[in-house]
Image (cartoon, rainbow, N blue to C red):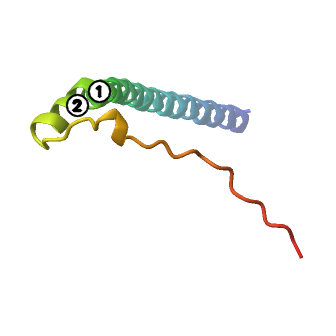
Amino acid sequence: MVKLNLLLMMIAIACAMGVVTSQHKARKLFIDLQQEQSLAKQMEVEWGQLQLEQSTWAMHARIEKIASSYLQMRVPEPVKIQVVPLQAPERRTAQ
């Protein structure tokens, strides 16, 4: 009977240790998850800021101002503009 009690007590201790270990791992994983979610939110904010910056740098009025002031570019006269029609590439037939 004493051996059975000792065996049951060892099993109970092993189960308790397993529960403690699994809870510790779960808490550690939850903390890691929260840190990664926080990082993801920071990256989303940064992505939004980068998109806003890109749209600001690529504004048509800004590009036109730089082209005219810094590069001394101007729009050509309408008679000097040539439109080149886009042609579909010719298909080669297998011979």
Q: Position of residue 38 (x, y in %)?
A: 36, 25
Label 1 CA crowd tier, 10 Å (few <14, some 14–19, many 20+): few
Q: Nearer the viewer, residue 12 or 6?
A: 12
The secondary element bearing badge 2 is classed as helix
Q: Nearer the viewer, residue 65 or 26?
A: 65
Residue found at the far left of this picture: 70
Q: Position of residue 27 (x, y in %)?
A: 45, 26
Residue lying at 21% horizontally and 37% vertically, measured from the top left: 74
Residue lying at 10% horizontally and 40% vertically, measured from the top left: 70
Residue found at the far right of this picture: 95
Q: Nearer the viewer, residue 31 or 15?
A: 31
Q: Position of residue 83 (x, y in %)?
A: 48, 42
Classify residue 71 by image quadrant: top left
Residue lying at 29% horizontally and 31% vertically, measured from the top left: 58
On screen, residue 27 versus residue 51, left or right, reads: right
Q: Nearer the viewer, residue 95 or 46?
A: 95
- Contact between labelled residues 2 and 1, with CB atoms less than 8 Å apart: yes
**Residue at mark 1:** 60
Residue lying at 49% horizontally and 34% vertically, measured from the top left: 25
Quarter containing the C terminus = bottom right
On screen, residue 56 versus residue 70, left or right, reads: right
Residue found at the far front of this picture: 79
On screen, residue 12 versus residue 66, left or right, reads: right
**Residue flagged by tag 2: what amino acid is it?**
Glu
Quarter containing the N terminus = top right
**Residue flagged by tag 1: what amino acid is it?**
His
**Residue at mark 2:** 64
On screen, residue 18 versus residue 38, left or right, reads: right
Q: Is residue 90 above or below residue 80?
A: below
The secondary element bearing badge 1 is classed as helix
